[in-house]
């Protein structure tokens, strides 16, 4: 099957096209973003059921590179990269589980969590980075001179870029807002040998600088402005539906910062619908923190207006972004998916994450934002009891230990840690230990 894809300007009045192996991130004619567009005619040569079978046969097996959750869908993602140039850690294939206890406590029928943080570098960013770095590898194999790959990051993009670039043996440069990422996120690119630049600014400032650096020949931009990343990330929705035996859930809640991921989620569903694998679309809710809520503000105007803002410090550092690159894509997606936007305060996101942790999870603060949004939507009666609801968990909680420690020590200013659990320090004395246990279990049985 001779599949093809290309970059196409997202401006419907322009629609200029470029090769996906051009180092280009915005249209040369009108400066709009570019989307990867696929030749659907060729893809239609396989029926919907043939695609389902092919994807199911490959899923989490070991024939290179098709066991990857991303490359198992290679024809739909980026068919132009030769298998030997693919750089993959077998990303994807993350667990989707029934959060039975939390769903029950919140009073909804079916709550599921898509645990995208159970991935090589601990976040969903791996899904997009495998495609981008593989494309860079293909470009180099074709004789193009790339000196390095670079990105601005709130912590997870840089971890993913550093790892994939290291596997490909391509130098990487990451721009981080100084002291605005977690210790784990800072040490990840350091261990992988990236050049780590901690800049005295916020994410939006890092983004401005990296764009200029990448205008120089030979440094390839790895931010989600580069829509190759979106192609990998869109496999989230394909994999999700596959895990439900090709049934579409009713509602999906996803946290949003730069808004590439919510756009990718929508793009995967659109492609499945265009190729006949599904016949309905879910509702999508994008969740933002009150401290960085430009999409929420736009939603309040019915998406008629949009103003970039200066994002304020938030516990949800990975989505502390005031001027999201994919704003147009995101608005388009939400309009097509009966979408809405919800916001959460620091206290709401902290308590929502901790409450879910008490049912056995271990949530990052961004997932806390999505869980807080879920609680608010339930409180407004906007979820039917029989709805199947999915929360996209975007990173592993272990990347955010400081957040967890501070919460349980009740040390987050302005946050009432309703679910704090503090260790009990005792001498080596059996009576005192037994007393402490009795007191605790007694209190539990009263409640
Ligand atoms: C990047 C990231 C997000 C936000 O994704 P966008 O595509 O920037 O909207 C959410 N959560 C985590 C953990 C992330 O790393
Ligand atoms: Zn254009």
Image (cartoon, rainbow, N blue to C red):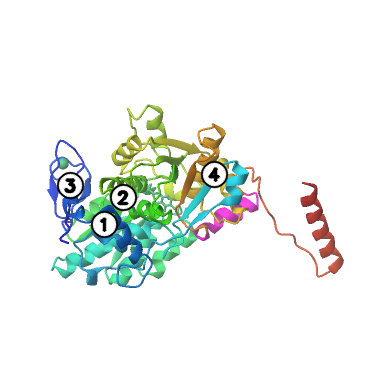
Cα–Cα gap, marks 1 and 4:
33 Å
Query: Which of the two discs, 4 and 3, sits closer to the camera?
Result: 3
Q: Which residue is mark 1?
A: 77
Residue 195 showing in the rendered view: no
Query: Which of the two discs, 1 and 2, sits closer to the camera?
Result: 2
Q: Where does the image place residue 206, in percent across and percent down from the top left?
A: 34, 50
Name the secondary structure under disc 3. Answer: strand
Front one among 383 and 172: 383
Q: Quick check: 404 left or right of 158?
A: right
Q: Which residue is mark 2?
A: 277
Tag 4–tag 3 contact (CB < 8 Å): no
Is the residue marked 3 within 8 Å of ligand 2, measured from its CB? no
Q: Is residue 204 above or below residue 245?
A: above
Instruction: Determine the main secondary structure of the stretch shown in magenta.
Output: helix
Residue 8 is marked as 3
Q: Where does the image place residue 416, in percent across and percent down from the top left?
A: 64, 42
Badge 2 or badge 4: first in the primary sequence: 2
Residue 328 is marked as none
Query: Which of the two discs, 1 and 4, sits closer to the camera?
Result: 1
Which image quadrant for residue 42?
bottom left
Q: Which residue is mark 4?
A: 349
Badge 1 or badge 2: first in the primary sequence: 1
Badge 1 or badge 3: first in the primary sequence: 3
Q: Quick check: 92 left or right of 430?
A: left
Cα–Cα gap, marks 2 and 4:
35 Å
**Magenta-colored span:** 398-411
């Amino acid at each position: 099957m001779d599949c093809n894809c290309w970059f196409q300007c997202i401006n419907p009045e322009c629609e200029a096209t470029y090769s996906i192996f051009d180092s280009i991130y915005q249209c040369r004619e009108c400066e709009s973003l570019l989307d990867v567009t696929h030749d659907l005619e060729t893809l239609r040569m396989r029926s919907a059921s043939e695609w389902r079978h092919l994807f199911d046969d490959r899923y989490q097996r070991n024939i290179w590179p098709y066991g990857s959750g991303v490359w198992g869908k290679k024809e739909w993602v980026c068919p132009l990269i030769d298998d030997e140039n693919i750089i993959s850690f077998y990303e994807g294939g993350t667990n989707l589980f029934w959060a039975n206890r939390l769903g029950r406590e919140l009073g909804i029928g079916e709550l599921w969590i898509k645990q995208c943080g159970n991935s090589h570098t601990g976040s969903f960013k791996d899904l997009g980075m495998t495609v981008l770095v593989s494309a860079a590898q293909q470009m180099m194999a074709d004789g193009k001179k790339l000196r390095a790959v670079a990105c601005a990051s709130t912590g997870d993009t840089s971890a993913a870029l550093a790892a994939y670039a290291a596997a490909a043996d391509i130098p990487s440069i990451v721009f981080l807002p100084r002291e605005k990422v977690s210790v784990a996120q800072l040490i990840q690119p350091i261990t992988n040998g990236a050049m780590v630049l901690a800049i005295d600014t916020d994410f939006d400032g890092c983004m401005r600088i990296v764009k200029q650096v990448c205008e120089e020949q030979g440094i390839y931009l790895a931010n989600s402005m580069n829509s190759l990343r979106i192609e990998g990330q869109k496999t989230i929705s394909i994999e999700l539906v596959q895990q439900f035996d090709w049934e579409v859930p009713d509602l999906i809640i996803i946290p949003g910062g730069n808004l590439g991921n919510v756009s990718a989620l929508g793009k995967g569903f659109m492609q499945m619908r265009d190729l006949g694998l599904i016949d309905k679309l879910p509702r999508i809710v994008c969740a933002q923190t009150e401290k960085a809520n430009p999409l929420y503000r736009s939603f309040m105007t019915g998406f008629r207006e949009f103003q970039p803002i200066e994002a304020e410090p938030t516990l949800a550092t990975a989505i502390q972004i005031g001027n999201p690159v994919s704003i147009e894509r995101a608005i388009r997606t939400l309009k097509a998916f009966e979408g809405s936007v919800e916001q959460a305060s620091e206290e709401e996101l902290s308590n929502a994450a901790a409450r879910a942790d008490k049912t056995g999870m271990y949530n990052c603060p961004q997932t806390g934002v999505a869980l807080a949004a879920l609680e608010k939507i339930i409180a407004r009666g906007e979820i039917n009891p029989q709805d199947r609801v999915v929360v996209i968990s975007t990173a592993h909680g272990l990347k955010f230990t400081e957040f967890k420690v501070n919460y349980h020590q009740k040390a987050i200013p302005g946050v009432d840690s309703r679910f704090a659990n503090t260790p009990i320090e005792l001498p080596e004395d059996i009576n005192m230990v037994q007393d402490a246990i009795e007191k605790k279990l007694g209190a539990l049985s009263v409640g």
